[in-house]
Image: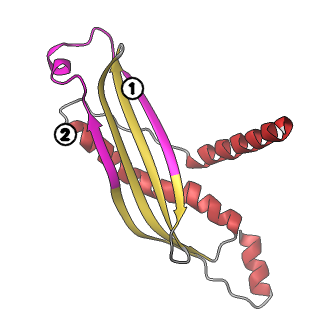
Amino acid sequence: MADENQNNQQEGQVVQQVLNLQRCYLKDASLEMPHAPAIFVNQPEEQPVVDIQFEVTPEKLGQEGYYQVAVRGTVTVKAKETVMFLAECKQAGIFQIAGFSEQDTQILLNVNCPAIVYPYLRGNVADLITRSSMPPVHLPEVNFAALYQQRLEQEKANAAKGQQQA
């Protein structure tokens, strides 16, 4: 990125790079407790199992240079096969991004922007679960750079597999 900026400045072009969070908002939230009130009355015999899933979805908006980045977190807590609760939140941010190469923009949308939105998601998920009178579940720290790299490698592997089948 720095090399591109220096090259553009040397050619007499001054490129203004912009990365601004315009708005951060809770796009969706749901809590399901299919076995309530029994889960409050009967103590589970085993330690409940917590499953946490994440999804990052960048989307180009109609206005030039504006993107929505949504991070969805799903927490499912089960005791044996009984679902105690399922909480799902989607936190989104509207970002203005300009002056970056396409590759750098993709990195910003899949690494930097989710990292900005994620703390809000963590707070909303913890609050939603606490309000259900269940013990709080705090989402772990996430390395969005590693997740993005994994997704790129998986897409590359899927493309290679598709070419072999063709």
* Quadrant in which the C terminus appears: top right
Pick the front one: 1 or 31? 31
**CA separation in Å, label 2 and label 1:** 18 Å
The vertical placement of 135 against 143, above or below, is above
Residue 80 lies in quadrant? top left
Q: Does the magenta stretch include residue 54?
A: yes
Applied colour scheme: secondary structure
Percent x, y for residue 78?
Answer: 34, 21
The vertical placement of 91 against 31, above or below, is below
Which residue is at 35% across, 56% downward? 27
Badge 2 marks a residue whose secondary structure is: helix
Q: Which numbered disc, 2 or 1, marks the residue that appears first in the sequence?
A: 1
Label disc, if present, on residue 131 of the rendered structure: 2
Give the magenta part as a residue range.
27-56
Which residue is at 68% across, 87% downward? 14
Which residue is at 63% across, 77% downward? 99
> Mark 1 packing: few (<14 Cα in 10 Å), some, or many (20+)?
some
Amino acid at circle 1: Val
Label disc, if present, on residue 50 of the rendered structure: 1
Amino acid at circle 2: Arg
Q: Is residue 35 magenta?
A: yes
